[in-house]
Image (cartoon, grey):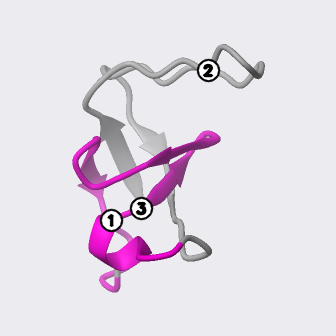
């Protein structure tokens, strides 16, 4: 799955790369999280995003 974040995200506590809202990233469904389907949770470069925080650019799996 490829997604584009709606906002820029940066983590100050850890040294993971930030997310730029102008770029497209690979993401995976966060199936290990409670209510992941209802909330549309995904992991994108170390960030946990919900369905209101990203736009799906390409969906390789129709079950998402």
The N terminus lies in quadrant = bottom left
The percent coordinates of residue 32 (x first, y second) are: 62, 74
Q: Is residue 13 above or below residue 34?
A: above
Between 59 and 21, the one nearer to me in the picture: 21
User: Where 39 sits versus 8, above or below?
Assistant: below
- The tag earlier along the polypeptide, 2 or 1, is 2
Categorize mark 3 by other alpha carbons within 10 Å: few (<14), some (14-19), many (20+). many
Question: Which is more N-terminal, label 3 or label 2?
Answer: 2
Residue furthest to the bottom: 63
Q: Would residue 64 be counted in the magenta stretch?
A: no
Query: At numbered mark 3, what does the secondary structure look like: helix, strand or loop?
Result: loop
Horizontal side, residue 34 vs residue 52: left or right: right
Residue position for label 1: 40
Residue visible at 38% across and 71% down in the picture? 60
Q: Provide residue 33's location: percent of width, then percent of height.
A: 56, 70
The tag on residue 41 is 3
Q: Secondary structure at mark 2?
A: loop
Q: Which residue is mark 2?
A: 11
Magenta range is 34-63
């Amino acid at each position: 799955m490829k997604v584009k974040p709606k906002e820029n995200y940066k983590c100050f506590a850890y040294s993971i790369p930030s997310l730029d809202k102008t770029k497209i990233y690979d993401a995976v469904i966060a199936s290990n999280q409670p209510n992941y389907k209802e909330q549309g949770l995904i992991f994108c470069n170390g960030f946990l995003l919900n369905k209101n925080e990203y736009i799906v650019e390409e969906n390789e799996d129709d079950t998402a």
